[in-house]
Amino acid sequence: MVEATGQVLSQAQLTARVGWVLDMIDAELELLLFDRYTQDGLALIAGGVAADGVKFPSNAWMMMRRLHWTADPDDAVCDRVRRCIEEAAGRTLRSAVDRHELIAGLLATWPKDPDKRTPTEWAAMWKAVPDKTDKTTLRNRTRQIAAYLAEHGQLPGGLIDLEPEAHHGRAWLLASADRQLVSLTRPTPDRAQLRVKLPTIDHPTSVRTGWEWVLITVTLPPTVPEVATLCTPTLRIVGGQVRVDLPFVITTPTAPLTGHQRALGVDWGINTLLTTSFGWLDQDQVKTDGRPYHFDAAGAATKSDRLRRQREVLQIKIKRHAALLTGLAVTDPRAVKLAAKTVTLQDEIDRISERQSNLHHQLAWAAARWLVDLAVATGATAIFFEDLRTLEPRHPNASMNARIANSVRGEIVTATRHLATKAGIALSTVPAGGTSSQCPRCLKELHHQRSASDPTPGFRWAVCGHCGHQGDRDHLASERVVSRGLAAQAHIQVNRTGVRRCAKTIDIKVRRQHKTAPTPKQNAHRARSTRTIPAIKRPAGDPETNSTELDGEQYTVLPELSRRQRRRRRTVGRGFHTGVHTLWTPQIPRTRRTPAINNA
């Protein structure tokens, strides 16, 4: 709504006005980055001080003005919008500085054979690259430099040769502005009101007449508590609508880095999505109760796999249409028809991808909620995930690669970190090498087979030939993860974004806590309901109308399910349940129509 006149703006009008501002920002941002995204510019920012010897301020737009790298838009653009442009440019350049320093360190110590470095070359490389650089980033950047060397026959001069353009997102960063451009209030617990200046025309000619205040009402989700402090948002346009990225801050207990005695170890399983073990420190050894905790999402995984197959079939059709369009004129009726079909198929692919993304999002947050609740119930103060980035994927099977690519592991870690921080639980990752291949009891090599009774080589069951210990592959790996996390707490590192990871691998043997008391007996009818419901007898139906009458009411006889429908009913929804479970209510049982038998 326009504040001065009370005019209510439609979604299309609001999108158009925000789009005009984004066009201004993109145009000036490209010019600013084109002049400053150079080796000398990145080296100057990496130094951390200006020409007068004063350190750069924390705000990116203030750093840009200290260097006199300011935006120069039209006079109709206010100074606060210029701040937003300079803030976006400064953040883009600062993010490129980290890559610039890493590439410079790798080029300075480039070996003869990057795949087989000597211990001396490894030591020189670690000394040249920035601190807290993980092996995964080093491996990826080394491959990037090697690909450039193979293509051009010489090493690149720096980051600018590897990435000639500075990529930036299309967003309006209002965090760098003040109340002259934007303000945010929360009149009710479930609503926030954003007051921002927007242009009235595409290219305004005056700051006073071409801009006006607009009030935008934002509905807050129930996950935002009333005690949360709302921060200045960022505006984007997604799918023809204005999206408000609204951060908020709440006070949470700070989880310590070290000193954890009870923790959970999480393994990314092959049999199930998550397999968790609970362990605790007992003097110099790690003990566990030997009970596995599984988060089985077979139903959601089946749905995701089905959507993936549908998308792949449509992509094959699009490739076929592209091959048929080769050699045809644009005005050819066959080319016009194929182009229209291609657009329709692409729209369907986008719709399927959105459905799959929503499914993965719901699955990730359900798994995170289950994991944090399990940690609270067991009294664990830390959760340790295995860091799969430290492994090299070696799956020649195309279907296995597709399953791994469609996983939601990264989103699960992000959601778990968010919920665990609220509960005061620390979350960290540990190296994943050897967690599934070594025995948690004696640290010897494991033999993998199909099951406990089937010695055929497989993935599900693990047997130790040294100590004789055996169990589910994922369960044994989760015990290794919790032992590594508890043993290497002193080597946990925290990066600038607050993400914790353990950079060192310390393997200790896991011992199982022996029972000190007999297992209590459980009532066999404990899980059953004490209320009994009498069975409803149903008379045979009329074969002509396929219906029957019971107690004066008409019921329709349900047809018999096919084999495919029965199989799908058994698979979809299994192991992944959310929402409120209602009590069972008596239903009319189905009756099967017996076919007539021809005795002749």
Image (spheres, grey):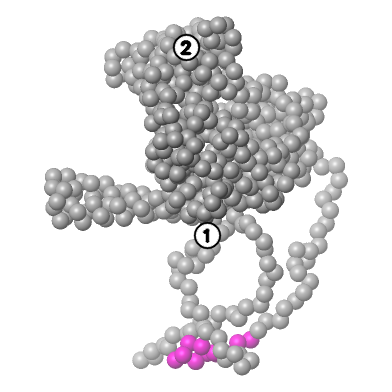
Callout 2 amino acid: Ala
Q: Camera-side residue: 24 or 263?
A: 24
Res. 263 in view: no
Q: Camera-side residue: 474 or 420?
A: 420
Look at the picture and state if 555 lies above or below 470: below
Image side of residue 321 versus residue 540, left or right: left
Q: Where is residue 574 drawn, in percent x and y?
A: 57, 58
Res. 200 in view: yes
Specify the principal SS of the magenta part: loop
Q: Where is residue 332 drawn, in percent x and y?
A: 13, 52
Q: Where is residue 271 drawn, in percent x and y?
A: 56, 46
View extreme (right): residue: 517
Q: Residue at x 75, y 67 (%)?
A: 528
Callout 1 amino acid: Thr
Circle 2: element type: helix
Q: Which residues are magenta?
A: 537-548
Q: Residue at x 84, y 53 (%)?
A: 520
Q: Camera-side residue: 486 or 348?
A: 348
Image side of residue 417 versus residue 113, left or right: right
Image side of residue 543 versus residue 219, left or right: left
**Label disc, if present, on residue 265 of the rendered structure:** none
Residue of label 2: 43
Q: How many marks?
A: 2
Q: Quadrant of residue 553?
A: bottom right
Circle 1: element type: helix
Q: Residue at x 49, y 64 (%)?
A: 567
Q: Camera-side residue: 364 or 458?
A: 364
Of circles 2 and 1, the one toward us is 2
